[in-house]
Image (cartoon, rainbow, N blue to C red):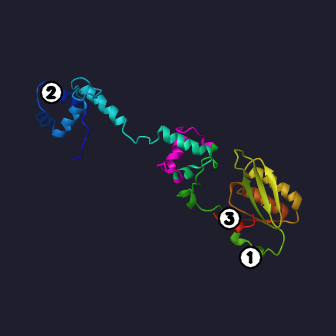
């Protein structure tokens, strides 16, 4: 039989039965409950406990309210205390990472995630923005439908698998690799990078197809006639079929997309 908490009605009946002079065993039989359940209920909510906040005779309504309060207080208590807080704050201000603190300070007996959670919850006098990586611990890789969706037809027709093998030998100038480099600072500006035997960069206002098009036009104004192919990753800034098709038609070059999570296919960049 599954255990269930005493109801408000049962607590009122316990109050009445106690007024009638019934003992715990008799009350338990009338309610169909175990004697120990009735005993614990009365002990928790009767003045026999000098520390009880119910410093009156057993009352069903008061007992029900106290039970609700106790249920609200159930949960893991925070392990942080003033000494631990000061110790972690001290090392954070020395530019230690939470990982270094947890694994390098003997008196810190909590996990790395706990330290991060305390920073996010403002339990420590330290801002997450002041960490060296601004609190970025890992990159989430999406799963499920997003990864299983069919590849864009345009990307398939421009896959690096279709790029001539002769380009790999690098005997001909003009086959470029491109990417965008985002600053670690809180800004949308980034660099569009073009790499062959030499590097060429263009500062752009954001990591979007619109801003990349501006960089591409600047690049082609400089190197028109020296660009035969361009290899890029599958970032959103390179995903506009209309823009890429425009550059292919206008300048007579060819774009190729590297496979996902394969930076070695654009090794020079």
Q: Quadrant of residue 165?
A: bottom right
Q: Seen in the image, is 74 located left or right of residue 251?
A: left
Q: The residue tagged with tag 3: helix, strand or loop?
A: helix
Q: Quadrant of residue 235?
A: bottom right
Queried whether the magenta region covers residue 106, the answer comes back as yes
Q: Circle 3 sits on which residue?
A: 263
The magenta region covers 103-129
Q: Are marks 2 and 3 in contact (CB under 8 Å)?
A: no
- Of the numbered discs 2 and 1, the one sitting upstream in the chain is 2
Counting every numbered tag in the picture gives 3
* Circle 3 residues within 10 Å: few <14, some 14–19, many ≥20: few
Rendered image: mark on residue 165: 1
Disc 2 from disc 1: Cα separation: 92 Å
Q: Seen in the image, is 113 located left or right of residue 209?
A: left
Q: Circle 2 sits on which residue?
A: 18
- Which residue occupies 53% across, 43% down? 87
Q: Seen in the image, is 119 located left or right of residue 261?
A: left
Disc 2 from disc 3: Cα separation: 77 Å
Q: The residue tagged with tag 1: helix, strand or loop?
A: helix
- Of the numbered discs 2 and 3, the one sitting upstream in the chain is 2
Q: Is residue 61 above or below residue 256?
A: above
């Amino acid at each position: 039989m599954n255990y269930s908490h005493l109801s408000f009605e049962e607590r009122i009946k316990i109050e009445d039965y106690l007024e009638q002079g019934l003992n715990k065993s008799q009350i338990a039989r009338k309610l169909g409950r175990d004697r120990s359940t009735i005993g614990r209920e009365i002990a928790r909510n009767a003045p026999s406990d000098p520390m009880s906040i119910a410093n009156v005779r057993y009352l069903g309504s008061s007992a029900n309210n106290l039970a609700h309060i106790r249920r609200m207080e159930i949960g893991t208590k925070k392990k942080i205390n003033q000494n631990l807080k000061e110790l972690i704050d001290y090392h954070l201000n020395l530019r230690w990472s939470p990982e270094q603190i947890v694994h390098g300070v003997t008196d810190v007996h909590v996990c790395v995630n706990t330290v991060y959670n305390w920073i996010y919850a403002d339990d420590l006098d330290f801002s997450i923005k002041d960490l060296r990586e601004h609190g970025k611990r890992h990159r989430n890789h999406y799963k499920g439908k997003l990864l299983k969706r069919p590849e864009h037809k345009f990307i398939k027709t421009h896959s690096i698998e279709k790029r001539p093998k002769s380009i790999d030998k690098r005997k001909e100038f003009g086959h470029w690799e491109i990417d965008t480099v985002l600053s670690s600072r809180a800004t949308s500006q980034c660099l569009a990078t073009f790499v062959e035997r030499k590097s060429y960069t263009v500062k752009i206002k954001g990591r979007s197809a619109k801003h990349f098009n501006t960089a591409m036009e600047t690049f082609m104004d400089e190197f028109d006639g020296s660009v035969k192919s361009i290899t890029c990753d599958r970032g959103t800034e390179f995903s506009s079929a209309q823009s890429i098709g425009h550059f292919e038609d206008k300048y007579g070059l060819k774009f190729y997309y590297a496979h996902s999570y394969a930076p070695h296919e654009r090794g020079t960049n």
